[in-house]
């Protein structure tokens, strides 16, 4: 069904061009309402009942969704044009920006991939008795509560919940599947008269639970504790904080949907080969510890993954990709915003990347109480700021955006961005990429209004392919003169440099290269290299016995990066018996020098000559030698029946 835009100027505080929006988007526009959520609520009700409405107001989402519920129809599509575009002190036309936001909102959203998590409400509360016992009394009617006391106190007389005492020495898992080890474990001995007593301490106690309330105030049990589902932690000295997590814990029973944030392709992972470690970028940057080594590749625990996206941004091979939404959806959103802006008459858009929490609120406050966003700044909300890496930044610039600003939130993991942004900056014009670490809406407005963006790209490109392919395509369009761009250390693009004087063409590097960037030649002793496939993982440099390999981070924009080049080659060695070419001359000569006359197997001149023979001639020489290793003793005579009978005493 064709969609219809329901417009409202919010008490005449913004200017909307109905005819221009209809022409730019191809959608039918309603008449311009003045108070759609109050005085003209009947018009909103009719539009929602029709089932084809896109209401251009997101502030009163609750009201419009309640109307849809009462009408028993699907909730209407909502888009915020007011805070992101309409409310702005910039005198420039807002139509191109509104057209871009509407075009991006019209893209089909891929379904979210989830995993069911079941919590039966088994709750472990850890801390001192004066804090945890009141919390346990509140939760006991709702959850199955066990209290782990950490102070030296007598057991409580309340038997509405279980009480133990000890020290947690190991904890792993997440919501619905925590597994803990407790040492010095003491349980309550309920028998006898008088004060209840503890049992004798013992180590190695094991327990499982669904939810943990950590009220110890000490070191968290898990890295990035705020990202561990089911692990609630509060300052025991703050009654407000304790009350908050008690309320949260009371809701953690039932079946929940856990999003599957990332996808893993183990076959192209460059973590290691033959026990030689290569790329550790995802392992080093994961804040929750969800990624662990698993042989030649890594594995990701989807239950622990919090979806920050840092691993996907840093992965050089594309083995890990952010999947909520997938990378191609992000590229499509970027390209749609840029192209729709230009089609509606805009020339040089700027991109503001923000999250759904802090960034969206900053934009709303800047619009309501400040100058609002400039008319050429287009906001794009992403699920994970850390996952917006150099490929996405370059794709935005190559699509026609003149600069990219990433608005950080106080909770943003900066490790990935602090490496991805310099990498993107090395491949584009100075000043076109920046991080905004701001918490004041007015300061945000000042930063955006005061910026001087570079000139727009003359011929924008369509970002397509994998993240590596998009990054290369974008870098090439942003640097039309070509050449080689130096990149920061640990960049996922670069060259392999070989010291030909030291290299013996043993080809160990070829056999272990995870991406196939290093290759041999079946016809002659050669080491070949294709630069665009190199991940700079370092396995080749690690495995090289002669230490002849070094890495050079760079982006080669010329077509030579897509072809095979010879890094080292030698004259093949000719067998001294039959003349067949085998091996490389320097290798055979070096082996002869090290073994001839110095090793027991090659002590004689005849034995030493075998080093310089091909496989067939070497076998023939060994077979015909005096000490033939293939020779056998005299074949034993076949034993017959007479031989056995002759030894019997009854014959």
Image: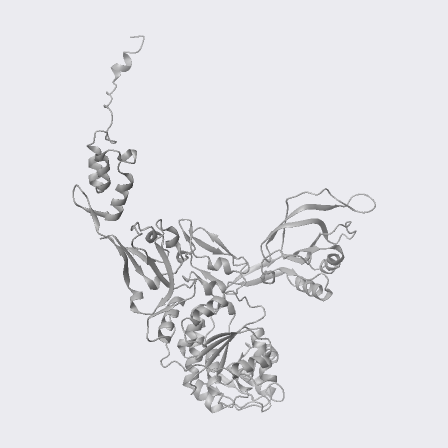
Residue 20 drawn at (x, y percent): 46, 90
The residue most toward the top is 650
Q: Is residue 51 left or right of residue 562?
A: right
The residue most toward the left is 578
In-front residue for pair 596/76 = 596
In-front residue for pair 516/45 = 516
* Point 28% across, 64% down: residue: 563
Question: In the rendered view, would you say 480 is above or below 37?
Answer: above
Colour mapping: one colour
Q: For residue 577, what is the image quadrant? A: top left
* Point 27% across, 47% down: residue: 587
Q: For residue 625, what is the image quadrant? A: top left
* Point 79% across, 47% down: residue: 196
Q: Is residue 125 visible?
A: yes
Residue 185 drawn at (x, y percent): 69, 46
Q: Is residue 453 left or right of residue 174?
A: left
Q: Is residue 255 left or right of residue 593?
A: right
């Amino acid at each position: 069904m064709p969609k219809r835009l329901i417009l409202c100027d919010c008490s005449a505080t913004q200017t909307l061009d109905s005819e221009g929006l209809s022409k730019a988007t191809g959608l039918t526009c309603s008449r311009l309402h003045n108070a759609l959520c109050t005085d003209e609520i009947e018009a909103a009700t009719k539009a929602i009942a029709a089932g084809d409405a896109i209401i251009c107001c997101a502030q009163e989402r609750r009201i419009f969704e309640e109307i849809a519920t009462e009408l028993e129809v699907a909730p209407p599509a909502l888009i915020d044009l007011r805070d992101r575009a309409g409310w702005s002190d910039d005198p420039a036309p807002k139509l191109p920006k509104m057209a871009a936001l509407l075009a991006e909102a019209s893209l089909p959203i891929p379904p979210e991939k989830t995993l069911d998590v079941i919590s039966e409400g088994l709750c472990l509360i850890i801390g001192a008795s004066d804090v945890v016992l009141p919390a346990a009394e509140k939760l006991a009617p709702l959850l199955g509560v066990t209290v782990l006391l950490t102070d030296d106190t007598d057991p409580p007389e309340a038997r509405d919940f279980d009480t133990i005492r000890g020290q947690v020495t190991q904890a792993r898992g997440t919501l619905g599947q925590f597994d803990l080890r407790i040492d010095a474990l003491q349980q309550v001995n309920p028998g006898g008269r008088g004060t209840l007593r503890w049992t004798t301490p013992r180590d190695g106690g094991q327990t499982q639970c669904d939810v943990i309330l950590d009220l110890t105030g000490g070191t968290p049990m898990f890295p990035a504790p705020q990202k561990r589902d089911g692990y609630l932690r509060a300052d025991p000295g703050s009654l407000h904080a304790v009350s908050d997590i008690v309320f949260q814990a009371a809701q953690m029973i039932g079946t929940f949907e856990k999003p599957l944030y990332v996808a893993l392709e183990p076959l192209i992972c460059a973590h290691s080969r033959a026990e030689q470690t290569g790329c550790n970028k995802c392992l080093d940057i994961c804040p929750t510890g969800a990624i662990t080594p698993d042989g030649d590749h890594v594995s990701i625990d989807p239950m622990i993954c919090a979806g920050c996206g840092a691993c996907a941004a840093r992965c050089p091979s594309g083995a890990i990709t952010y999947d909520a939404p997938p990378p191609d959806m992000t590229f499509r959103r970027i390209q749609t915003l840029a192209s729709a802006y230009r089609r509606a008459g805009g020339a040089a858009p700027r991109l503001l990347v923000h999250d759904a929490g802090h960034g969206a609120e900053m934009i709303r406050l800047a619009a309501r109480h400040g100058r609002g966003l400039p008319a050429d700044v287009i906001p794009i909300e992403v699920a994970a700021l850390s996952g917006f890496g150099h490929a996405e930044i370059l794709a935005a610039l190559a699509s026609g955006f003149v600069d990219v600003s990433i608005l950080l939130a106080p909770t943003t993991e900066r490790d990935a961005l602090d490496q991805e942004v310099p990498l993107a900056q090395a491949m584009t014009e100075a000043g076109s990429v920046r991080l905004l670490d701001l918490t004041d809406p007015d300061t945000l407005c000042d930063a955006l209004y005061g910026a001087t963006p570079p000139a727009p790209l003359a011929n924008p490109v369509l970002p397509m392919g994998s993240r590596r392919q998009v990054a290369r395509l974008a870098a090439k369009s942003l640097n039309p003169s070509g050449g080689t761009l130096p990149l920061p250390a640990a960049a996922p693009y670069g060259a392999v440099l070989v010291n030909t004087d030291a290299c013996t063409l043993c080809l160990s590097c070829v056999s272990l290269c995870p991406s196939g960037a290093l290759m041999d030649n079946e016809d002659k002793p050669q080491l070949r290299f294709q630069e665009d496939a190199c991940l700079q993982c370092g396995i080749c440099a690690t495995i090289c016995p002669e230490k002849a390999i070094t890495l050079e981070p760079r982006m080669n924009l010329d077509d030579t990066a897509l072809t095979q080049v010879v890094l080292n080659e030698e004259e093949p060695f000719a067998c001294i018996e039959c003349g067949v070419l085998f091996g490389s001359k320097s290798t055979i000569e070096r082996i002869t020098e090290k073994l001839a006359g110095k090793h027991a197997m090659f002590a004689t001149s005849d034995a030493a000559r075998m080093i310089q023979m091909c496989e067939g001639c070497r076998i023939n020489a060994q077979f015909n030698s005096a000490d033939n290793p293939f020779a056998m003793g005299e074949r034993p005579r076949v034993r017959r029946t007479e031989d056995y009978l002759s030894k019997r005493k009854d014959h």
